[in-house]
Image (spheres, rainbow, N blue to C red):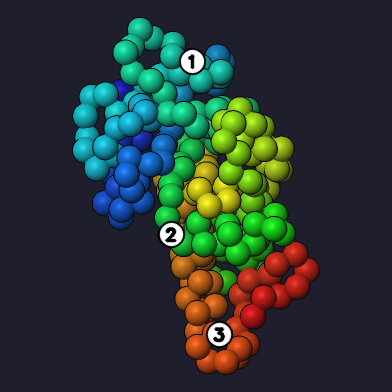
Amino acid sequence: MSKQQRWNELADVKDELASRDWFPGTSGNVSIKVSDLPLAFYVSASGKDKTKRTSEDFLLVDQYGEPVEDTHLKASAETGIHCEVYRLTDAGCCLHVHTVDNNLISELYGDVGEVTFQGQELIKAFGIWEEEGSITVPIVENYGDLSKLSEAVGAVIKPDTKAVLIRNHGITVWGRNAFEAKKHLEAFEFLFSYHIKLQTLNVLNKNQSFGGVKNGTTTIS
């Protein structure tokens, strides 16, 4: 694909996520890989209204998150996280959004450092087809030092990791291309929303048992 095609692909994903109100208050950021050697990717320009589509939505950066072309634009403050994802995975696209559900999940299980979903249909979105298959999302603290935050995210990425939650902040998720990254994000947000609603029903119905999520080795009901 040409650089313009990559740009358009990323812009289309951004528009769709914005239509779901997943970028409140100019929050969040998205990126798409343009080349492997040397690494270069388009990433969100800082402070832009992501509900609008303009010619200045993204800028091209290198493996260190530095612009590779002359520009007055500033890369998203969290570009370092994208650099870690591309360094450690085969990702071709990386998406970061702030939603109420992913913030609640990150706070509920932040002390454990991860949340595991098991035995739910949407897990198939990650290529997991076992009847009792599971997927774990690591959770890191929301460090104010963005270099430290990027390092923390990189430290928990394993070969089978598809996303990382930042506590009381948001989720960073990736895929081999924009379609797969969006699919993974949609699936995680479904799982988060589903679990929070179940937990609410659990309280309202005096601690009746519900399955579907594991916290470490203990099933949360």
Which residue carries the number 3 mark? 202
Which residue carries the number 2 mark? 100
Which mark's residue is nearer the viewer, 3 or 1? 3
Seen at 70% across and 67% down, the residue is 215
SS class, disc 1: loop
| Cα–Cα span, label 3 and label 1 | 48 Å
**Whether residue 56 is situated above or below residue 215 in the rendered picture:** above
Q: Nearer the viewer, residue 99 or 6?
A: 99
x and y percent of residue 19 in the render?
26, 51
Residue type at tag 1: Glu
**Whether residue 202 is situated above or below residue 187 in the rendered picture:** below
Seen at 67% across and 75% down, the residue is 220
Which residue carries the number 1 mark? 66
Seen at 70% across and 43% down, the residue is 156
**Whether residue 51 is situated above or below residue 151 in the rendered picture:** below
x and y percent of residue 95 in the render?
45, 41
Q: Do the residues labelled 2 and 3 touch (CB within 8 Å)?
A: no
Disc 2 crowd rating (10 Å Cα; few below 14, some 14-19, many 20+) is: some
